[in-house]
Image (cartoon, helix red, strand yellow):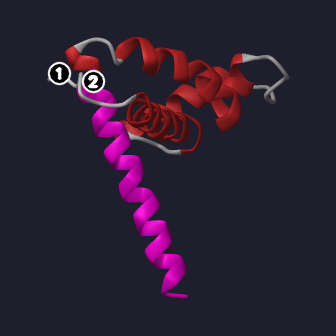
């Protein structure tokens, strides 16, 4: 897949959505086979998430996104990475649309 015709704003939006989606999955979702949940248990160990620790990174969306963003940017320059970023961005948009529809139906 080649996305050379995207504007810098479109690339920024895709990467932002993908970063948010992957960060949210890592910090607050179980994931398939409880993969993300097990990662958080491993990162936290038997302790609370101390500032600056892997446990904090695994439970703080804001902290996690700081590290996911450069990885997403790096991955975007390869065709396989573009597919992954696009899938994450589409998933994020679906969640945002569902949230908006649910809010409008209240």
The span from disc 1 to disc 2 (Cα, nearest Å) is 8 Å
> How many numbered marks appear?
2
Which residue is at a point 39% across and 30% down the rendered structure image? 11
Can residue 44 be seen in the rendering of this structure?
no
Where on the picture, by quarter, is residue 48? Answer: top right
Mark on residue 82? 2
Image quadrant in which the C terminus is located? bottom right
Tell me if label 1 and label 2 are in contact, CB under 8 Å.
yes
Which residue is at a point 32% across and 12% down the rendered structure image? 77
The answer to whether residue 34 is above or below residue 51 is below
Q: Main secondary structure of the magenta part?
A: helix
Pick out the residue farthest to the left. Answer: 1
Which residue is at a point 59% across and 37% down the rendered structure image? 27
Where is residue 22 drawn, in percent x and y?
A: 47, 34
Q: Secondary structure at mark 1?
A: loop
Q: Could you say which is closer to the camera, residue 38 or residue 67?
A: 67
Where is residue 14 drawn, in percent x and y?
A: 40, 36
The span shown in magenta is 82-106
Q: Which residue is mark 1?
A: 2
Which is in the foreground here, disc 1 or disc 2? 1
């Amino acid at each position: 897949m080649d996305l050379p015709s995207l504007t810098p704003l479109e690339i920024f939006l895709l990467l932002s959505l993908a970063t948010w989606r992957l960060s949210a999955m890592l910090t607050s979702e179980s994931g398939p086979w409880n993969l993300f949940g097990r990662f958080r248990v491993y990162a936290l160990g038997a302790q609370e998430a101390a500032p600056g620790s892997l446990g904090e990174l695994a439970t703080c969306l804001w902290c996690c996104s700081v590290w996911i963003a450069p990885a997403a940017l790096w991955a975007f320059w390869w065709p396989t990475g573009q597919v992954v970023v696009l899938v994450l961005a589409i998933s994020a948009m679906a969640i945002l649309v569902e949230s908006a529809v649910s809010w409008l139906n209240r």
